[in-house]
Amino acid sequence: MSTDIKPNRNLFLVLSAIMGVLIIISNYLVQFPINKFNLQDVLTYGAFSYPVTFLITDLANRRYGKKEARKLVYIGFAIGILLTIFVSTNFQDIISLRIAIGSGIAFLVAQLIDVEIFQRLRNNKWFVAPITSSIIGSIIDTFLFFSIAFLGTGISWLTLAIGDLLVKLLMAFLMLIPFRLLIFKIRDLNTKKYLV
């Protein structure tokens, strides 16, 4: 049992670091609309990186259970939001501040809901928990973030939110592939057996 503790801790630290980096990257990229194919009013680059955070949360939940997955969310929040504030927040620009605040609130609420839903569905078929929790979490995250960050600014936040959500939903389905591949490698400490 003691030989398993260090790899468990190492995996948790790796997942925490990845979560923080993903938040920083996504918070930076959300400021840039995609200016190709007439998508500037519909989509930002952040829509492609952020959905991976749900994969990380779901892997932690599968590996460690709800309590540790929540801990990962809090660590990711602290790392991501603090670094976002210091790295990409322009304190002279109200939208930049609102992005940081909106990101923090949306991330925390959506990820904690994702953890709860995943935990309740974890004993169903392998894909039910990650896809359901990611879809619901993405919907909550998208509308919380975009309304806090851009409501009343003149930016077409609703169309950006819808475009962002469509990409997140697509990414949620695509994230099932790495989830399925990785659960063969990750021992589920919650049930003390390997998943199939």
Image (cartoon, rainbow, N blue to C red):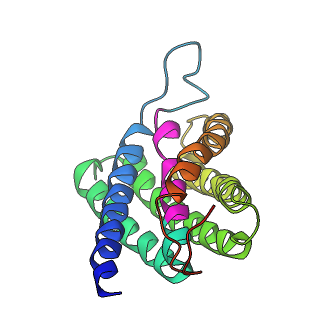
Residue lying at 54% horizontally and 42% vertically, measured from the top left:
153
> Which part of the image, by quadrant, shows the C terminus?
bottom right
Foreground residue among 76 and 60? 60
Magenta residues, dominant SS class: helix
Q: Position of residue 48 (x, y in %)?
A: 50, 37
Q: Position of residue 160 (x, y in %)?
A: 61, 36
Outermost residue on the top side: it is 37
Position above or below: 167 against 132: above
Q: Position of residue 1 (x, y in %)?
A: 36, 87
Q: Position of residue 47 (x, y in %)?
A: 53, 39
Residue lying at 31% horizontally and 75% vertically, measured from the top left:
9
Magenta-drawn stretch contains 109 = no
**Is 3 placed left or right of 27 in the picture?**
left
Magenta-drawn stretch contains 55 = yes
Query: Which range of residues does the magenta coloring cover?
Result: 45-59
Outermost residue on the left side: it is 86
**Is 57 placed left or right of 25 in the picture?**
right
Position above or below: 178 against 104: above
Position above or below: 43 against 148: above
Q: Quadrant of residue 31?
A: top left
Q: Quadrant of residue 129?
A: bottom right
Outermost residue on the bottom side: it is 2
Foreground residue among 163 and 170? 170
Foreground residue among 187 and 100? 187
**Is 161 placed left or right of 85 in the picture?**
right
How many marks on residues? 0
**Is 165 placed left or right of 102 in the picture?**
right
Foreground residue among 76 and 155? 76
Residue lying at 58% horizontally and 21% vertically, measured from the top left:
39
